[in-house]
Image (cartoon, grey):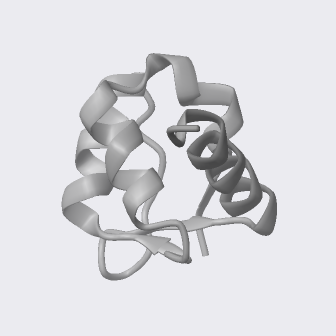
Amino acid sequence: MITVHIREFWNQLSPETQQWLIDNPGSIIIPRTQTAILNNETGEDGPVDGHGGTLLTDEDRDFIRAQARRIEPK
């Protein structure tokens, strides 16, 4: 399974991609369409799984949740 490390690329992602990740914090696998967008934005062209998706690690999901908490209105 192919993994990505979102923390390393977060600042390269568009606000729309960041929002997609924040809106889907429980996703373990980024779907192929979103993987293609992510790869385009980061310049990465890593291999994908058999369905074109990319695996998020536990660390990735924790980071995304932390970003979501950071931008929640107070």
Residue shown at 49%/75% (left/top)? Answer: 27
Residue shown at 55%/76% (left/top)? Answer: 26
Nearer to me, 37 or 20: 20
Residue shown at 25%/48% (left/top)? Answer: 36
| Image coordinates for residue 17, horizontal then vertical, percent | 32, 40
Q: Is residue 2 above or below residue 65?
A: below
| Image coordinates for residue 34, horizontal then vertical, percent | 27, 55
Q: Is residue 54 above or below residue 39?
A: below
Using residue 25 as the reference point, say whether residue 51 is left or right of it: left
Write down the quadrant of residue 61 in the picture. bottom right
Which quadrant is home to the N terminus?
Answer: bottom right
In the displayed image of the protein, which residue is found farthest to the right? 59
Q: Is residue 5 above or below residue 59?
A: above
In the displayed image of the protein, which residue is found farthest to the left? 33
Using residue 18 as the reference point, say whether residue 31 is left or right of it: left
Which quadrant is home to the C terminus?
Answer: top right
Write down the quadrant of residue 9 in the picture. top right
In the displayed image of the protein, which residue is found farthest to the front? 74
In the displayed image of the protein, which residue is found farthest to the top? 11
| Image coordinates for residue 49, horizontal then vertical, percent | 44, 74
| Image coordinates for residue 51, horizontal then vertical, percent | 30, 80
Q: Is residue 4 above or below residue 1?
A: above
Residue shown at 80%/57% (left/top)? Answer: 59
Nearer to me, 28 or 21: 21
